[in-house]
Image (tube, rainbow, N blue to C red):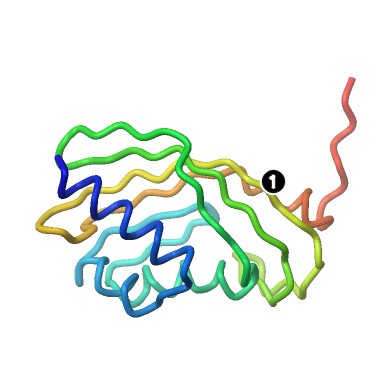
Amino acid sequence: MTEIKDTAAHFVAAFNANDEKTLNELHASDIKFSAPGGFKATNAHEATAYAKRWLKGFPNGKMTVRNEIVSAPWIVQEVTMEGTNTGPLEGPMGTVQPTHKHVVGKGVQILKVENGKITEARIYFDLLDQMTQLGLIPTPVTV
């Protein structure tokens, strides 16, 4: 169980350091990866490219783990992502130019770790909330 927690912690640290080399090394060569917007990856390069898209749009972006549950070989992490959109952000509907807005989003990542590599990853977050915080979608009226 320690290997799973250590690998996940190493991933978060590499993400926060914008360390592309380490991110790529942590992803298994045949990773199965999915994220909101219909994104799917089947190799380490594509999975790392997804993380880099976010870090390009939010160069000061940081991921904080709020809670985690380990059930080998899986780890489920509740995370908060925070950063200011100062770079172009590639998304399912094209590239969004910097809005310079600060965004705080909550999400969950579910990782399968085998032999120190992330072999499966599923990410869930509220894409509508993120787009609203960026000012790309009007704020919903509350009743």
- Front-most of residues 122 and 7: 7
Toward the top, the furthest residue is: 143
- Residue 96: x and y in percent read 73, 71
Residue 20 occupies which quadrant of the picture?
bottom left
Which class describes the residues within 10 Å of circle 1: few (<14), some (14-19), or many (20+)? few
Q: Is residue 20 left or right of residue 84?
A: left
Occupied quadrant, residue 23: bottom left
Residue 25 percent coordinates (x, y) = 25, 73
Which structural element holds mark 1?
helix
Q: Residue at x 76, y 56 (%)?
A: 102
State left or right for residue 100 relative to residue 23.
Answer: right
Q: Quadrant of the C terminus?
A: top right
- Tell me which residue sits at (56%, 67%) in the image: 54
User: Quadrant of residue 119 in the image?
Assistant: bottom left
Farthest-out residue, left: 115
Q: Quadrant of the N terminus?
A: top left
Say above or below: 65 vs 44. above
Q: Residue at x 49, y 57 (%)?
A: 38
Count the labels in the image.
1
Q: Residue at x 46, y 54 (%)?
A: 35
List x then y, in percent, for residue 94.
66, 72
User: Relative to residue 104, is residue 4 drawn left or right?
Assistant: left
Report the amino acid beneath label 1: Leu
Is 84 positioned to the left or the right of 7 in the image? right
Disc 1: which residue: 128
**Coordinates of residue 44 in the picture (x, y in percent):** 28, 72
